[in-house]
Structures are given as C-alpha cells and as structure tokens.
Image (cartoon, rainbow, N blue to C red):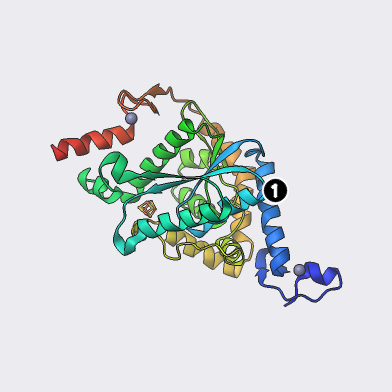
C-alpha cells in the first residue's frame, strides 16, 4: 500500500500504517505529521492550554503517556513529567516503569517529578488496599493518583495536568457508563476537566487517537515503553468494554470515534444539565487539600491504616 499524501504529490512511498476509519494509508513522515496535527487540533479545539502555560504530564511508563510527553515537548510546550511510583513489585513493574520515565526525561531533557508512595505514605498501593480492607485496588489507586496529581499541580504551580487517555479508553468508559446509565459520570465525561480551588485542570489531548495509532507513534519515534500493563489491571472491568468496542469497530470502522464524538456533541450537554450540582469545598482538617467532607478520602484511608498499624 502506498502513502496517500506522497501519491498525491506524484511520489511512491510505502505506507507504514493504514488508518481504517479515515481510509488513510501513510508513510512514516506523513503519519508522524498527521498524528501531531491531530493532537494539536484537539488541544486547540478544547482550549486545553497554550504555549506559555506550564503543563504537568502524568507519565506511567506506558506508550500513551510517554508519547504525549515527547510530542508536547517537541511541539514547543513547557512540560514537566510527573510519575507516581506505586511500589508494585510483581515483575518489577514499578521499578521498570520509573526507569522508562527517567530515560525519556533524559532524552527530551525535561524534569521528572517522582512521587514515591512508600516514602511519602509508608506503604505501597497494594499494602494500602490490603490494610484498609478494600478489594478494589484500582479504585483506591485512582483516588491516590488524583490526590497526588492535584497536590503536585498546586505545589509546582502547573496550569494543567495532561494524561495519555486515548480513544479506546474514553469510548470504553463511555460504554460502561451508558450501560449502567451513570448520569453523573456521563455529565462529567469530557476531554477537559476544569480547575476548581485546589483541583487541577485535567486534559486529555489524545482522546481522539486510538491505541494502535499511539503505539505506532511510540515505535516510530523510538520511545521505550512498558509493553505489559500493571499486573493489577486484570481486576479492572474496562478490558471487556474495550473488547466489545473492538468487535464493533472491526465490523463497522469508525464506531469508536463516532460513538465518542457524537456523545460529546449531542448527549453530554443534556447530561451535564442534569448533573449541575456544585459541592462546597473546605480544606481537609489533616492535609489541607480541598474536600467535600471534614477529612479527605486519602487521609481517611491513611488514618484507618494507622489504626491498623497501631
Ligand atoms: Fe493502579 Fe489498577 Fe492502574 Fe495498576 S491497574 S496502576 S493498580 S489503577
Ligand atoms: Zn508520505
Ligand atoms: Zn486530607
């Protein structure tokens, strides 16, 4: 297959990728250009951030977040990487993830902030989940990650936190929320989560790009990334929704993009109206971070654990 853009210019260059839902075959050069253009278009369309604003990129060591960090840096944005080391020993997951983030930081010559859970809270994420008596490690992990990102954003005076969530992630979350008619979540699902006292602005510049496109970008740019996901990922439900959507995508190319884009355009504004509740935020009595209760959920969990420890 030949690159469509090269062909239009009268050149014969072999395509490295065929993007089925756009019916687009592209060579390396034109794919990398297309990929960056799509990301920048999304950033502009949703007014995510501008060139002079300092952005924290949440990097896990996976293809999505590392690709995003390199792309934003190359596009001239002011970036800093933020990595949360969860202390997961299985297959040396946390150690390897941190190494890959450090490697990219050196390559692109940007600072990396590392938040080590064990050092800061005396326990790894698996210990926290176990000691607090919770089986849903991923939901605890999500709570801690959000808390830490907000804290770092505040401390470093960051304009926004960018995450590597892609179209596969977003459409899977959308399907899961739709199947359960989670109106509250549907009203909030959006590529930009606006800042509110103490809560950082969160943005997802890759929300219209697929996993396949991102993995191709990472490989073509020579980015080393964790090929195996977190060992606890098998406990999450999202793979089932991703598989369902992959089947539909196979039968009807463009399903994922249509599903997500049409939701943002037609359904999200309706759900948003239904969920316009503003909560009063007060500083947590222990850590000072904003919360709707007296004590924030992270401090509540940590207090419980300290009780268990004692
Ligand atoms: Fe955390 Fe679960 Fe993701 Fe692992 S799979 S990083 S435990 S949320
Ligand atoms: Zn080309
Ligand atoms: Zn707190």
- Point out residue 181 in the picture as x, y percentages from the top left corner: 46, 45
Question: Can you say which quadrant of the picture contains the N terminus?
Answer: bottom right
Residue, disc 1: 41
Give the residue drawn at x 39%, y 21%: 282
| Quadrant of residue 239 within the rendered picture | bottom left
Give the residue drawn at x 70%, y 48%: 41
In the image, farthest residue toward the left: 310
236 and 174: which is toward the camera? 236
116 and 200: which is toward the camera? 116
- Point out residue 98 in the picture as x, y percentages from the top left corner: 41, 54
Disc 1 on helix, strand or loop?
Answer: helix
- Point out residue 35 in the picture as x, y percentages from the top left corner: 67, 58
From the viewer's perspective, tell me whether residue 84 is left or right of residue 204.
Answer: left
228 and 282: which is toward the camera? 228
The relative height of residue 107 versus residue 296 in the rendered view (above or below) is: below
From the viewer's perspective, tell me whether residue 273 is left or right of residue 128.
Answer: right
């Amino acid at each position: 297959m030949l690159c469509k853009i090269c062909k239009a210019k009268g050149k014969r260059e072999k395509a490295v990728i065929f993007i089925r839902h756009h019916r687009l075959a592209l060579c390396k050069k034109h794919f990398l250009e297309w990929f960056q253009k799509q990301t920048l278009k999304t950033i502009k369309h949703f007014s995510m951030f501008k060139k002079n604003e300092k952005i924290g990129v949440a990097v896990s060591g996976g293809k999505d977040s590392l690709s995003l960090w390199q792309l934003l840096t190359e596009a001239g944005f002011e970036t800093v990487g933020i990595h949360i080391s969860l202390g997961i020993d299985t297959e040396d997951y946390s150690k390897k993830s941190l190494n890959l983030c450090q490697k990219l930081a050196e390559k692109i010559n940007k600072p990396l902030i590392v938040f080590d859970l064990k050092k800061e809270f005396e326990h790894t994420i698996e210990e926290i989940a176990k000691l607090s008596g919770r089986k849903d490690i991923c939901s605890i992990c999500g709570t801690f990650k959000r808390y830490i990102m907000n804290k770092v954003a505040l401390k470093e005076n960051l304009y926004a936190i960018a995450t590597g969530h892609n179209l596969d992630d977003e459409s899977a979350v959308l399907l899961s929320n739709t199947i359960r008619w989670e109106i509250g979540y549907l009203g909030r699902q959006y590529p930009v989560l606006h800042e509110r006292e103490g809560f950082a602005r969160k943005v997802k510049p890759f929300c219209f790009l697929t996993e396949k496109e991102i993995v191709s970008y990472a490989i073509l740019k020579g980015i080393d990334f964790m090929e195996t996901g977190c060992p606890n990922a098998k406990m999450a439900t999202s793979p089932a929704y991703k598989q369902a959507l992959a089947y539909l995508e196979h039968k009807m190319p463009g399903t994922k993009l249509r599903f997500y884009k049409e939701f943002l355009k037609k359904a999200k504004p309706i759900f948003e109206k239904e969920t316009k509740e503003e909560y009063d935020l007060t500083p947590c009595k222990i850590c000072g971070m904003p919360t709707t209760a007296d004590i924030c959920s992270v401090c509540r969990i940590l207090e419980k654990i300290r009780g268990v420890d004692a």
